[in-house]
Image: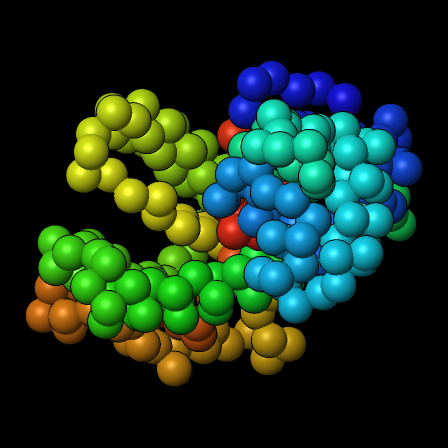
Amino acid sequence: MDSDEHKRVLDPERDTAALKALTHPLRIQLLGLLRQDGPATASELAARTGESSASTSYHLRVLAKYAFIAEAEHRDGRERRWRALHTVTSWSNESMESTEAGRAFVGLARRRQIEHLERSLARYEADLAAGRLGQEWVEPSGITDLMPRLTAASLTELFDTVAGKLEELTARDADDPRAEHVVFVAAGLPLAAHEHGAHEHADRETQDRDPEDRETEGPETEGPETEDRDTSDHEPEDLTR
């Protein structure tokens, strides 16, 4: 396991047992909640997930066994509290593709990220409607859906550029009282051309932003806190990129 203060890097050869432990939807969700909202008890997490306290307690112990979480300082002696040990789980896609356990984990983690995006959208809309978010967030918020033609090298460069800029802005805003937690999900999924060789240009321009200012292309794509590349997962549920 390679790790630093913020990132847990999984290797399919060395971390086989940890991968299998994390290939469980509820465990990914629990880890994401601890990363997003901070330390919590099994009972508190049960209330948020709709599961029983016995179930969340068991799955939290499994996460602790494989060093994804640890006990936090207790408010009282009645029930232990848990905290996430890292803010993101990362891996190499190429390495994960080489093992069955790695492929299973990546597939599940990506689908959990999509579910996390759906929940985050619902929460954002509710927060805005209830006045918990100021109007200054209306314009910059949204989901961008594009379909550029890129090489594999360019896609890698794009992710690296975004990761670097995000790290820079996060550091800049760390102590700014105006800052809020922002769910930022990025996806880059190449699609092979159809057998007849035609490139599809339909179903475009489906973005939720002002058409005079912004453009979008392609089918809607979405991508907890996790990252499936070895650069620097909120809910992150997830993980889990």
Q: Is residue 103 visible?
A: no
Residue 219: give x, y in percent of width and height: 44, 74
What residue occupies the far left of the structure in this picture?
A: 212
Q: Residue at x 40, y 70 (%)?
A: 122
Q: Is residue 32 visible?
A: yes
Q: Nearer the viewer, residue 144 or 236?
A: 236
Q: Residue at x 49, y 44 (%)?
A: 36
203 up-or-down from 199: above or below: below
Judged left or right of residue 66, residue 168 is left
Judged left or right of residue 137, residue 199 is right
- Quarter containing the N terminus: top right
Residue 92: give x, y in percent of width and height: 68, 35
- Quarter containing the C terminus: top right
Judged left or right of residue 118, residue 140 is left
Q: Nearer the viewer, residue 42 or 131?
A: 42
Judged left or right of residue 207, residue 79 is right
Q: Residue at x 70, y 40 (%)?
A: 79
Residue 94: give x, y in percent of width and height: 72, 39
186 up-or-down from 79: above or below: below
208 up-or-down from 173: above or below: below
Q: Residue at x 56, y 74 (%)?
A: 197
Q: Nearer the viewer, residue 17 or 189?
A: 17
Q: Quadrant of residue 226?
A: top right
